[in-house]
């Protein structure tokens, strides 16, 4: 990475961080979180990265919010991130910062240099999906703290607010954290027919097993190949909001992009409508089942 110092100045007042649906009148003890569906790139950010928008978009969860549209229309609450993941990744711990990316990283600052940082995909991404460096210089640590304050914190404050509203009405809450996964990963891991749906429950720790079993059963009944915790067992949102003693549960849903999209062209595939109907129908069935608990 070039050692020059980047001077990125973002006007956060102009940024819409998230969109909410059915958050005012809660009808189900289920919340849909879509943290990687954002497509907004601050212009000042684009001026300082070496990747074009098309390349940057390859790590977003393609059309996941649209796959869930029928479920939202049925009244299920949803929180969707509007800002692109490559600008700030809200499904990471705030401490997942790579000190080597900054010209002024505080020596005394606590850090969590885990597998995501080492791979270049911490809360602030270092690389794109081709594993090329995003930036042509070093970032300002103080500027990145503004990203966390005005984007990251805002998303999580809203998610917590929605959880508290559900808890107040129903006494328990399930957060279904919704993602898509590259088809190549699914095929590499399972060389039989590929994984269609992955349900990550932190190896049966994030929610009662019957919740994840029920959703798996919905997809199995529609002839989808479902795996638990493979290739993903759950990321930051699944781990952070899992509070069983307070009856807050989490489950990560991963949908194989190859089922419904042309991944190279970032376009919907011919099976999009059918997959969307199956996904929403399964999620609505889960929501109805939770109402009967």
Image (cartoon, helix red, strand yellow):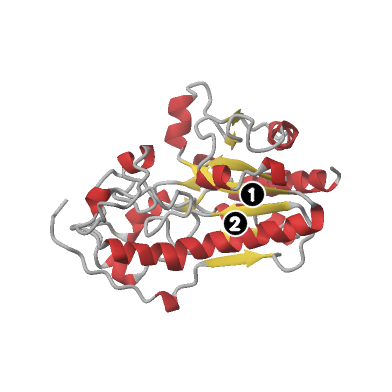
184 above or below 94? above
Residue 21 is left or right of residue 135, and the answer is right
Considering every residue shown, the one lying at the far right of the view is: 292
The structure residue drawn at horizontal position 79% and vertical position 45%, both measured from the top left corner, is 290
Q: Quadrant of the C terminus?
A: top right
Closer to the camera in the image, 105 or 239: 105
Say which quarter of the image contains residue 118.
Answer: top left
Considering every residue shown, the one lying at the far top of the view is: 192
Residue 138 is left or right of residue 229, and the answer is left
Residue 77 visible to an observer of this rendering: no
The structure residue drawn at horizontal position 50% and vertical position 56%, both measured from the top left corner, is 37
Mark 1–mark 2 contact, CB under 8 Å?
A: yes
Residue 263 is marked as none
Residue 72 is left or right of residue 171, and the answer is left
Say which quarter of the image contains residue 279.
Answer: top right
**In what element is the residue under mark 2?**
helix
Residue 172 visible to an observer of this rendering: yes
**In what element is the residue under mark 1?**
helix
Q: CA distance from mark 1 to mark 2?
A: 7 Å
Decide: few, some or many residues near mark 1? Use Cα within 10 Å; few <14, some 14-19, many ≥20.
many
Residue at the spot of label 1: 276
Decide: few, some or many residues near mark 2? Use Cα within 10 Å; few <14, some 14-19, many ≥20.
some
Circle count: 2
x and y percentages locating residue 197 in the rendered image: 59, 36
Residue at the spot of label 2: 66
Considering every residue shown, the one lying at the far front of the view is: 108
x and y percentages locating residue 205 in the rendered image: 63, 33
Q: Earlier in the sequence, mark 1 or mark 2?
A: 2
x and y percentages locating residue 102 in the rendered image: 23, 56
x and y percentages locating residue 174 in the rendered image: 69, 47
235 above or below 88? above
């Amino acid at each position: 990475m070039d050692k020059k110092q980047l001077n990125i100045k973002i006007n956060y007042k102009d940024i819409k961080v998230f969109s909410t649906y059915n958050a005012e009148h809660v009808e189900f003890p289920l919340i849909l979180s879509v943290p990687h569906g954002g497509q907004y790139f601050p212009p000042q950010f684009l001026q300082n990265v070496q990747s074009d928008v098309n390349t940057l978009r390859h790590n977003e969860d393609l059309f996941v919010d649209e796959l869930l549209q029928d479920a939202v229309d049925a009244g299920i609450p949803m929180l969707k991130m509007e800002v692109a993941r490559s600008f700030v990744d809200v499904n990471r711990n705030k401490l997942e910062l790579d000190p080597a990316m900054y010209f002024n990283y505080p020596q005394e600052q606590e850090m969590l240099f885990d597998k995501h940082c080492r791979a270049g995909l911490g809360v602030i991404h270092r690389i794109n999906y081709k594993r090329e460096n995003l930036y042509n210089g070093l970032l300002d640590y103080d500027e990145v703290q503004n990203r966390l304050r005005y984007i990251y914190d805002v998303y999580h404050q809203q998610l917590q607010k929605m959880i508290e509203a559900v808890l107040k009405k129903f006494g328990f809450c399930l957060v279904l954290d919704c993602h898509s996964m590259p088809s190549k990963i699914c095929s590499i891991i399972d060389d039989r027919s590929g994984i269609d749906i992955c349900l990550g429950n932190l190896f049966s720790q994030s929610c009662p097993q019957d919740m994840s079993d029920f959703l798996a059963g919905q997809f199995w009944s529609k002839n989808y190949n479902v795996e638990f915790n493979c290739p993903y067992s759950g990321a930051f949102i699944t781990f952070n909001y899992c509070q069983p003693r307070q009856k807050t549960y989490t489950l990560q849903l991963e949908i194989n992009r190859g089922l419904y999209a042309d991944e190279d062209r970032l376009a919907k595939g011919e099976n999009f409508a059918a997959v969307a109907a199956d996904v929403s129908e399964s999620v609505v069935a889960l929501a109805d089942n939770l109402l009967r608990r």
